[in-house]
Image (cartoon, rainbow, N blue to C red):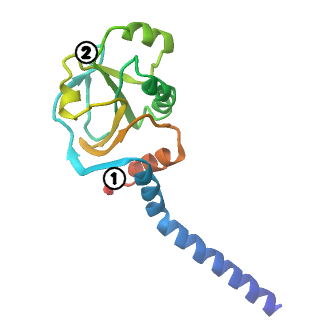
Amino acid sequence: MNKKILIISVTISIFLSFFLYSSKNNEKIIENEFIDNFSLLKQNEKFMDIELFDLNKTKISFDNSIVILNFFETWCSACNSEFYALNQFAGKYKDTIKVVSIFSETEGFEEWNKKYNYSDIIFVKDEESILSRNYKIDSIPVTFIIKNKKIIFRIDGARDYQSGSFMNYLNYITKNPAKLF
């Protein structure tokens, strides 16, 4: 009987040790997986302190929030390939994360928006390309992750916004407000 208890105790101890070790290193795994797939900007680079307005002329607040800021154009096939997942993501997390998509070429936008009805994304016109110039957007799509008015990451190219690494990273920064890398 004592031998059984000893074996069970050792098994539980090994399991708990492994579990605690894995949990402790989980943040590093999430961080590394994300960094391997996306390009890191200067840590805590300040987001431009300007006012942005959506298509209904409503001011967009960046205070105390996480924002996915996406630069795109309706004619861009790479942009269109990521938009369905981006809209799904925006709908799923609309209470905690804002998804703002910026475009400069207005021709064809109305028809494009009616066709796809991306209703969970906030759209902003950048007709004079002020934002595009300030953030050195030379190809699209480009996406920034902004937290509390500070840029955390710049993502160049199309991505799957439902992917495990992206979701893990957003869960991580949502639950760890002081840890921005």
Up-down relation of residue 129 to residue 159 (above or below): above
Q: Amino acid at mark 1?
A: Pro
Within-10-Å neighbours for mark 2: few <14, some 14–19, many 20+: few
Label 1 belongs to which residue? 177
- How far apart are labels 2 and 1 at the CA level? 30 Å
Q: Residue at x 46, y 30 (%)?
A: 86
The residue lying toward the viewer, choosing from 85 and 75, is 75
In the image, taking residue 14 as reference, residue 133 lies left or right, namely left
Residue 126 in view (yes/no): yes
Instruction: Pick out the residue farthest to the bottom.
Output: 2
Pinpoint residue 160: horizontal percent, then vertical percent. 50, 37
Q: Which mark is residue 57?
A: 2
Pinpoint residue 111: horizontal percent, then vertical percent. 43, 7
Instruction: Pick out the residue farthest to the left.
Output: 49
First reached walking from the N terminus: tag 2 or tag 1: 2
Q: Residue at x 22, y 35 (%)?
A: 135
The residue lying toward the viewer, choosing from 65 and 45, is 45
Label 2 element class: loop
Pinpoint residue 59: horizontal percent, then vertical percent. 24, 23
In the image, taking residue 96 as reference, residue 138 lies left or right, namely left
In the image, taking residue 85 as reference, residue 147 lies left or right, namely left
Q: Amino acid at mark 2?
A: Lys
The quadrant holding residue 31 is: bottom left
Asked if labels 1 and 2 touch by Cβ distance under 8 angstroms, the answer is: no
Label 1 element class: loop
The quadrant holding residue 141 is: top left
The N terminus - image quarter: bottom right
